[in-house]
Each structure stands twice: as structure tokens, then as C-alpha cells.
Image (cartoon, rainbow, N blue to C red):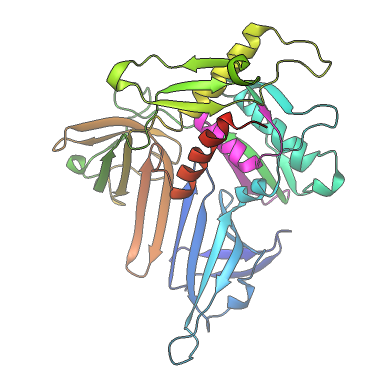
């Protein structure tokens, strides 16, 4: 079994365990991964598996324990196993909302994607105006100025959700890893490699049952959540409300959505009107990045052969863009690995992967519906 270490948030080593019953964890490119561990309650060091301690596998695979439980059976006898649930360290970003500066309604930031992401982390966790919001062990990695130029604004939104949106829009990932030597938690942005068969200058990676690299593949093609044309509502009421449109589809192929962007300012902090072209561009950008949440028509999930020609974390890793192929289905797609699930059981080790956006959960669908319903409500 994969050895794990239990450490405190201040890096004190408490124990090392390799005789648990089972463990699996998910690494997520855009969102937040999690870990589940089952271990017999009589095993040595189980007493250290408590809320707040960290399950450490390596610097990029560390999970903070958030939940544990043990149940009684129908005879009132305690179960033999503890169930431990932990979240990836990046979950700490979700402990903050985006508080704007005291002089402005919104925290606005423009620049390359990495700079924008680091700005919000710095302002809300590292160098927050309120010292009680600071997390002393968190630092920023060196800024490599990666990603496209974007303009973003935020006000009292969950910071992890904001970063996930930026990540989906830009393709860049984000993470918090451990620097054991300096005893710091490091926020960093990541860019995956292009390993596709036709574009890559690197050796291509093709996941396919025909090439003995993919054991199983689940392919879904759907328009149930599909939107490709947006009406974006800015400021104003009724016929005076500013509306811009995003999209080019017509007729039967058009799937419309309303996006509320009333928070896009028409005046700056000094009450000076913002140029109309700039306001329209901001509304257009807002519509485009929110449409990206609805454009996913194809969902791919598969179990990767652990003894395939491609070695995990060397030939490919989370965030890389690879080629997925099933000739029997007539499916060939280039897609990013957005989630990887590592499974450790007595029977052996398995890898499962999600390619591209995963299917929207019920909670995500509800949020999307509510965002549309709120669009024309008078405030």
C-alpha cells in the first residue's frame, strides 16, 4: 500500500501508516480534490487521524482531515473501521470570500491570468487588510505571468469558486502544495502540456483500448445542459437596461440563456462614466466565460491501465491535454485531464480519469438556474 504520513499544519510528523484497509483520492485541475481513507480502529497511530491534521503523500498530494466517522451495527457493536474524509490543501482558499478594498465596491484586477489569481489570494489570505484574515503559513509561488489577459471583478464571492471559474475560462490550473524545507504552504498556478497526437512537439499520449492504455471508457454526448447564445444584462431597468449578446448560432441550433451582469459598473470610483466600448467589452467577456460552463457537450470518464505504455506523472499528468480514441465508437477527441483518481486497495492500485469538464452536479445545475432566474429581478 502507498505509505502516508500524518503531520500537523505546522509540519510536525506524528506517524507513518501503510496498513490501512483502503484509500482513494482525487486530484482536480479546476476544482478541489478529496481523499477517503478506511482503517481498522485498532491499528497503530489511528489516534492521529483527527480533524485538522494533514495526510501527506508528497508535496503535491496533501489533504487536510475534515471529517471522520464510525458507526454501530444493528446489534449496537462498533464498526471495525474508521472512515476518514479529507480535502486537498487548496480547500483552504475556500475559507475566504473576496472582500473588496474599502474605497471601491468591487475588487477589480486586470492582467495575465496568473497575476489575477495571485492578486485575489494575496488580498484575501496573505496580505489581507484585516490581519485576522491572514494565514501566516501561506505564500505565493514566483509569478511566471502565465495565461491570457483577462479582466476580473469580485465582491464577497467564495474565493475557491472564483478561482475555479477563472481556471475553467483560461485552462490554467491552481493548487496549494507543501514546501517541507521552508515549512510553508505554497499557492501556485499550473499550465498543462499539449500531448495530443497532431499538435504536440512532445511525445503524444493516446488513451485507447486499442492501444492497451485504457481499460474502460464511458462516453456521453449531451445537449441537456447546452447553451451557445447569451443575452448579457448590464445596468439599468426595463427598456433602459443595457443588453449585449454573445454567440453566432441561428435557428434550431441556437440555445439561449440570460446572464445577469448588473454588477458591471458604468462609472468608475470617482463617478466618472466608463467608456461605452469598455463596458460592452466587459459584458461580452462576462458572457463568454459563463457560456463556457454550458458548452460542454461531451463527457469522458475512463479507467487507465496502470501497466499501459504511458507512465503516470512522467508521460502524462493532471492538466495535460491528451488524445482519447475508441475506433469502435468512431470517437477521437483531444481533451484535458481535469481529474485523476488514485485508488489503493488490498487488491492493487487503479487509476481513473476525467477528460474535459465533468458532468454538472445537481447543485451546480441549481446554481446555474438560480443565476438565470435572478437576472431580471428588480434590486
Give residue 247's position: percent from left, percent from top.
Answer: 42, 17
For the question of whether residue 170 can be seen, the reply is no
Residue 378, given in percent of the width and then of the height, sits at 64, 31
**In this rendering, is residue 365 above or below 149?**
below
Q: Quadrant of residue 236?
A: top right
Q: Is residue 134 above or below residue 288?
A: below
Above or below for 299 versus 240 = below
Residue 150 falls inside the magenta stretch: no
In percent of width and height, residue 228 lies at: 39, 24
**As rendered, which of 81 and 54 lies closer to the eye?**
81
**Quadrant where the N terminus is found in the figure:** bottom left
Give 94 or 326, whichever is nearer the viewer.
94
Q: Quadrant of residue 186?
A: top right
Which residue does the image show at 70% across and 24% down from the upper left? 109
- Residue 312 falls left or right of residue 78: left
> What residue is drawn where x is 56% and y is 61%?
86
Say which quadrant the C terminus sits in.
top right
Q: Nearer the viewer, residue 293 or 339?
A: 293
Is 176 magenta? The answer is yes
Amino acid at each position: 500500500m502507498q505509505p502516508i504520513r500524518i503531520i500537523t499544519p505546522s509540519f510536525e510528523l506524528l506517524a507513518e501508516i501503510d496498513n490501512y484497509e483502503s484509500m482513494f483520492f482525487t486530484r482536480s485541475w479546476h476544482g478541489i480534490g478529496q481523499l477517503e481513507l478506511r482503517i481498522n480502529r485498532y491499528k497503530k497511530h489511528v489516534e492521529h487521524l483527527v480533524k485538522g491534521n494533514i495526510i501527506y503523500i508528497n508535496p503535491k498530494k496533501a489533504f487536510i482531515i475534515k471529517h471522520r466517522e464510525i458507526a454501530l451495527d444493528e446489534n449496537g457493536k462498533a464498526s471495525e473501521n474508521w472512515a476518514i474524509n479529507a480535502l486537498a490543501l487548496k480547500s483552504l482558499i475556500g475559507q475566504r470570500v473576496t472582500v473588496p478594498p474599502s474605497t471601491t465596491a468591487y475588487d477589480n484586477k486586470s492582467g495575465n491570468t496568473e497575476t489575477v489569481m495571485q492578486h485575489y489570494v494575496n488580498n484575501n489570505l496573505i496580505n489581507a487588510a484585516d490581519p485576522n484574515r491572514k494565514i501566516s503559513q501561506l505564500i505565493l509561488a514566483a509569478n511566471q505571468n502565465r495565461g491570457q489577459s483577462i479582466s476580473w471583478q469580485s465582491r464577497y464571492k467564495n474565493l475557491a469558486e472564483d478561482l475555479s471559474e477563472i481556471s475553467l475560462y483560461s485552462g490554467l490550473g491552481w493548487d496549494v502544495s507543501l514546501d517541507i524545507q521552508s515549512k510553508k504552504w505554497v499557492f501556485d498556478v499550473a499550465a498543462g502540456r499539449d500531448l495530443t497526437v497532431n499538435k504536440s512537439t512532445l511525445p503524444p499520449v493516446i488513451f485507447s483500448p486499442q492501444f492497451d492504455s485504457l481499460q474502460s471508457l464511458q462516453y456521453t454526448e449531451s445537449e441537456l445542459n447546452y447553451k451557445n447564445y447569451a443575452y448579457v444584462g448590464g445596468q439599468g431597468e426595463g427598456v433602459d437596461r443595457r443588453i449585449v449578446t454573445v454567440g453566432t448560432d441561428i435557428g434550431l441550433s441556437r440555445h439561449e440563456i440570460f446572464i445577469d451582469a448588473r454588477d458591471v459598473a458604468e462609472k468608475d470610483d470617482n463617478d466618472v462614466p466608463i467608456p461605452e466600448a469598455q463596458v460592452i467589452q466587459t459584458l461580452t467577456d462576462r458572457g463568454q466565460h459563463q457560456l463556457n460552463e454550458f458548452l460542454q457537450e461531451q463527457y469522458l470518464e475512463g479507467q487507465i491501465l496502470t501497466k499501459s505504455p504511458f507512465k503516470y506523472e512522467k508521460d502524462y499528468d493532471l492538466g495535460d491535454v491528451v488524445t482519447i480514441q475508441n475506433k469502435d465508437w468512431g470517437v477521437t477527441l483531444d481533451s484535458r485531464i481535469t481529474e485523476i483518481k488514485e485508488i489503493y486497495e488490498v487488491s492493487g492500485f487503479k487509476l481513473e480519469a476525467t477528460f474535459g469538464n465533468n458532468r454538472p452536479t445537481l447543485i451546480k445545475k441549481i446554481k446555474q438556474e438560480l443565476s438565470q432566474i435572478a437576472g431580471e429581478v428588480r434590486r
